[in-house]
Amino acid sequence: MSTGALVRSLSVMAGVWLLASAAPLYADAPPPAGVSGALEWRLVGPYRGGWATMAAGDPSRPDTFYIGTAGGGVWKTNDAGRTWQPIFDAMSAAPIGAIAVAPSDPNVIYAGSGQVAARYDVAAGNGMYRSDDGGKSWKHIGLIESKHIGRILVDPHDANTLLVGVLGHYFGPNRERGVYRSTDGGKTWTQTLFIDANTGVVDLAADPADPQTVYAAAWQVRNYPWLSYFEPNAGPGSGLYKSTDGGRTWKRVSGSGWPDGTLARIGIATASGHRVYAVVNSAKPGKDSGLYRSDDGGATWQAVSHESWLSNDYFSRLTVDPNNRDRLYSAGQSIRRSEDGGKHWGIFKGAPGGSIRVTRNV
């Protein structure tokens, strides 16, 4: 290499080194005045903190309702969903599995942490929370080892009396599963239903005419990190339980027509005239999976639909029109509606294939 070429090469290397050493100074320098005035902050996510897991409305203000999300806490809207505000960011739990507004005092809101979906990356919570001012502030009210809470029922006449369906640990057994009851707003709890260390409760529903009659859906589920999509989330502990004294005592439902195979997740809803709906997922798809209906409080059952999308471990949520017990909705890949008690369904909202989300049967 000639002397001139060597000098030019060393000069380039020195320039690169100087630029590199000056980079932090350059990065910290303010932008030119003509540019800084045009800069604006914008939200780049998360938009919902994951999918919505549960919704609850204020009965006195129809435009005010709340959603719990899989990883973003609780959100509130005062304008029927046009705008939302996160109201749970100061709390120590992000995943929400259940949320409920007290019918007798809409300022009282309960939130149960920990999502309930059979996923390998499911997020656990740390118990129950309560707000007494419409979500402006919250306090932790126990059940730390519940981990995943599926449903909360508040007594329609007493904001301090409630039932909580606790699924428990996903990756191991624990004693803190089943149904818990409190009569002092969560200061103390009584475990009124315990099945076994591997079976928890994922859903609750009360008879609309008699809130002392309550149904609980039990789910024996255990996720294994290396088998989460190959091992059925089912077991003999899964089933339906009924209480006629407000959740103090329980009895397992085994009426005529109820599936007798090994079951997985069950979703339940109640309607007038002692009607009970149950979306049942089975370890053997096609045999016992489907929608079941009882018109006598669970004494007898009939299978009304075996649509493949109905039963799964992700959704299994049913809502009945309070003015028409034959009209019900199922929210999953799409929102579907039935006008004949679950026999036939049509898509009410959403993509038939559920966009990018796939629901699986086990």
Image: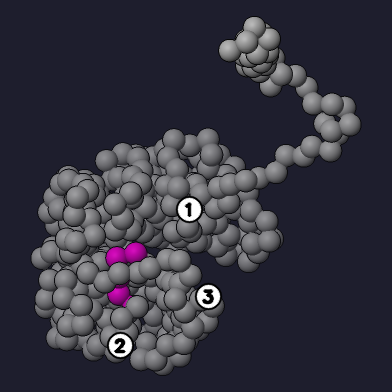
Q: Position of residue 322 (x, y in %)?
A: 48, 79
Q: Say whether residue 50 is visible.
A: yes
Residue 132 left/right relative to 44: left
Residue at image point 48% right, 70% down: 355
Q: Earlier in the sequence, mark 3 or mark 1?
A: 1
Residue type at mark 1? Gly
Q: Earlier in the sequence, mark 1 or mark 2?
A: 1
Residue type at mark 3? Gly
Q: Say whether residue 183 is visible.
A: no
Residue that carries the numbered disc 2 in the rendered image: 305
Q: Position of residue 70 (x, y in %)?
A: 43, 52
Residue 28 left/right relative to 97: right
What numbered label is drawn on residue 350?
3
What numbered label is drawn on residue 50?
1
Residue at image point 23% right, 89% down: 302
Q: Nearer the viewer, residue 59 or 348?
A: 348
Query: Eyeballing the image, is 282 above or below 345?
Result: above
Q: What is the residue that sits farthest to the right in this orientation?
A: 34
Quarter of the rendering occupied by the N terminus:
top right
Residues tagged 3 and 1 counted as in contact (Cβ below 8 A): no
Q: Position of residue 349 (x, y in %)?
A: 54, 78
Q: How many marks?
A: 3
Q: How is the image coloured?
A: one colour
- Which residues make up the magenta segment? 310-314
